[in-house]
């Protein structure tokens, strides 16, 4: 099939494009950056340069590709994650830009897809830190969101909700939104790269467990997230799918294990009040109260099977 990937050069895009090409698809990869055209070519795709916030440029790029399927992997999140950043992501330029990519960027791609006669649209969403903190510990796509998230998460939630609604209600094709878990693996914030945004402070013991460490996180290896996306390009009913591994786990379980896999000393523990002071309310809730997500629907309806069914194997063999 002809597949148009917006965000072809991103962490997820760099895993996805080669997988799509290997599955026999003809891929056009969009970047905003002319110097990255060669990267797209190197993955076996045809590059096209356009700014996702420029409606006309997106329309021209999509029209030139005549795609059957459009994949939306646009974010400005790379390099964004640290506990300190989590204190005020609403003030962060990266978070604001990511929200624009999830709202305006989505609208532009949908309009272009409709005009170009595409029949399927697959978009990146996010599962972690969104579900209701009541109930759980592992929630499905049908479960409600946190009705009262801390202010800093509210804006991000609004961006995801907008994107998911826009994509899954198109009447000219099939729209799927994939709620990824927290990425780990090459290029992500959890990798063996010296500057990996989350792994680096863990190595320096600057990423403590706050309070009980009872917050439940759902992870997914970036190659597995890409594999689910490649499957969603080809099949699956319209709708929302959690794309996470089989083992949501509490912070007090996975963080020491990850530190061990990175060769670091066990994380420090700090009380909740100190966590609130140092890292803010949102990070404290992420460490203590959030719930995980179930991948049962993606496994059942997409027939997707993650290579790393648990982060336990992934952090040993898949950090790059
Ligand atoms: N996904 C999440 O929800 C999430 C949450 C927390 C942390 N993270 C971390 O953040 C990183 C995210 O990876 P990712 O693959 O989602 O994003 P990414 O690596 O930042 O890639 C973003 C892609 O979007 C493109 N892009 C951004 N703005 C654009 C614009 N205005 N016009 C056209 N293209 C534009 C970039 O293109 P060019 O650069 O080529 O122009 C790039 O291809 C990972 O390290 C992950 O661990 C992700």
Image: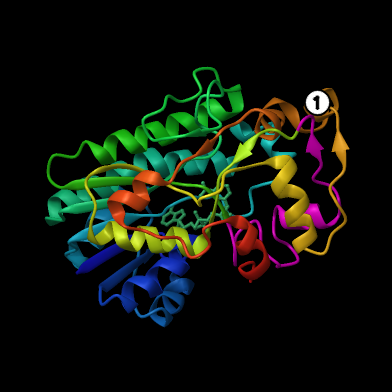
- Residue at coordinates 59% horizontally, 22% vertically from top-left? 151
In the picture, the quarter occupied by the C terminus is bottom right
Instruction: From the image, tell me which residue sits under label 1.
Output: 272
Looking at the picture, how far across and down is residue 40, in whole percent? Answer: 41, 74
Magenta residue check for 94: no
Span highlighted in magenta in the image? 184-212
The answer to whether residue 115 is above or below residue 1 is above
The N terminus is located in which quarter?
Answer: bottom left
Q: Residue at x 49, y 39 (%)?
A: 293
Q: How many marks?
A: 1
Q: In this view, does 271 lie above or below 26?
A: above
In front here: 101 or 1? Answer: 1
Q: Which element type, helix, strand or loop, lies under badge 1?
A: helix
Q: Nearer the viewer, residue 78 or 287?
A: 287
The one of 310 and 233 positioned closer to us in this rendering: 310
At 21% from the left edge and 36% from the top edge, which residue is drawn?
Answer: 169
Q: Give the farthest residue toward the top.
A: 148
Q: In which quarter of the image is residue 197?
A: bottom right
Is 120 on the left or on the right of 304, as rendered? left
Image check: 36 left or right of 169?
right
**Residue 154: percent from left, percent from top:** 53, 26
User: Residue 203, located in which quarter of the rendered image?
Assistant: bottom right
């Amino acid at each position: 099939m002809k597949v148009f990937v917006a965000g072809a050069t991103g962490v997820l895009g760099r895993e996805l494009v080669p997988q799509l090409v290997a599955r026999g698809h003809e891929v056009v990869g969009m970047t905003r950056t002319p110097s990255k055209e060669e990267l797209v070519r190197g993955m076996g795709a045809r590059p096209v340069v356009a700014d996702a916030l420029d409606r006309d440029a997106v329309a021209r790029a999509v029209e030139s590709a005549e795609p059957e399927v459009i994949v939306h992997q646009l974010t400005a999140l790379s390099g964004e994650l640290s506990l300190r950043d989590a204190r005020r992501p609403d003030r962060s330029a990266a978070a604001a830009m990511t929200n624009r990519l999830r709202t305006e960027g989505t609208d532009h791609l949908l309009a272009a897809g409709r005009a170009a006669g595409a029949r399927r649209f697959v978009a990146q969403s996010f599962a972690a830190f969104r579900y209701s903190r009541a109930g759980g510990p592992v929630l499905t796509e049908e479960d409600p969101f946190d009705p009262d998230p801390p202010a800093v998460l509210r804006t991000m939630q609004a961006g995801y909700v907008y994107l998911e609604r826009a994509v899954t209600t198109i009447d000219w094709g099939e729209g799927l939104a994939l709620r990824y878990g927290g990425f780990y693996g090459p290029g992500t914030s959890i990798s063996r790269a010296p500057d990996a945004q989350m792994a680096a402070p863990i190595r320096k013991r600057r990423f403590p467990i706050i309070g009980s460490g009872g917050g439940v996180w759902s992870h997914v290896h970036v190659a597995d997230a890409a594999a689910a996306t490649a499957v969603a390009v080809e099949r699956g009913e319209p709708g929302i799918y959690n794309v996470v591994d089989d083992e949501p786990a509490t912070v007090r379980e996975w963080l020491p294990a990850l530190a061990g896999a990175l060769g670091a000393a066990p994380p420090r523990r700090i009380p909740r009040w100190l966590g609130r002071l140092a890292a803010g309310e949102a990070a404290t809730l992420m460490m203590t109260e959030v719930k995980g997500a179930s991948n049962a629907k993606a496994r059942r309806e997409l027939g997707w099977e993650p290579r790393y069914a648990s982060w336990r194997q992934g952090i040993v063999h898949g950090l790059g």
